[in-house]
Amino acid sequence: MTMHPLLAFIDAPIIIGILVVGALLFGADKLPKLARSAGQAKKEFLVGQAEADEAAARAREEARLRAAAQHADIMDNVEAGAIGGESIPPPTPGRGTQSS
């Protein structure tokens, strides 16, 4: 996995500096609320992502079943000799089928 060049410069002192500036801007009592709301937003995002993945999987399966139904052989559901309800006699060598 490659790292973005700007992220290579972020290390512990920079992160600490960002937290100090955040504490000065928002106040120390607001930071836990901000972190909690960020955690809830992440959780909701992951739940939504899981639901979208499940919906995509269902759509792929339905598309696969539709494609299989389109390419199915129509004669798979037809029984031999079931047309008209009477059995068809086998052909006789040299004479064809017997007539009644």
Image: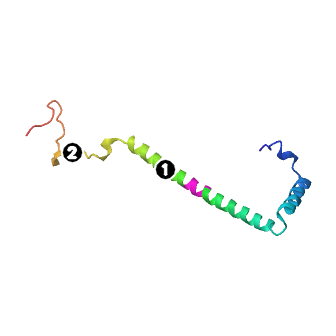
Return the x and y of residue 28 as percentages of the image width and height.
85, 67
Please, which residue is most extreme toward the top here? 94
Q: Residue at x 84, y 66 (%)?
A: 27
Q: Taking 19 as reference, is 29 above or below it?
A: below
Quarter of the figure that contains the C terminus: top left
In terms of sequence position, does the residue under pointer 2 or pointer 1 come before the other? 1
- The color scheme shown is rainbow
The circle drawn on residue 61 is: 1
Is residue 48 shown above or below 8?
below
Q: How many marks?
A: 2
The residue that disc 2 covers is: 81
Q: State the CA–CA distance, disc 2 to disc 1.
A: 35 Å
**Does 45 lie within the magenta span?**
no
Instruction: Give, as a three-letter code, the residue at label 2.
Output: Gly
Q: Nearer the observer, disc 2 or disc 1?
A: 1
Give coordinates of residue 10: x percent, y percent: 86, 49
Which residue is at a point 38% across and 42% down the rendered structure image?
70
Q: Would you call the spot at circle 2 few (<14 residues within 10 Å), some (14-19), or many (20 or more)?
A: few
x, y percent for residue 60? 51, 48
- Mark linked to residue 88: none
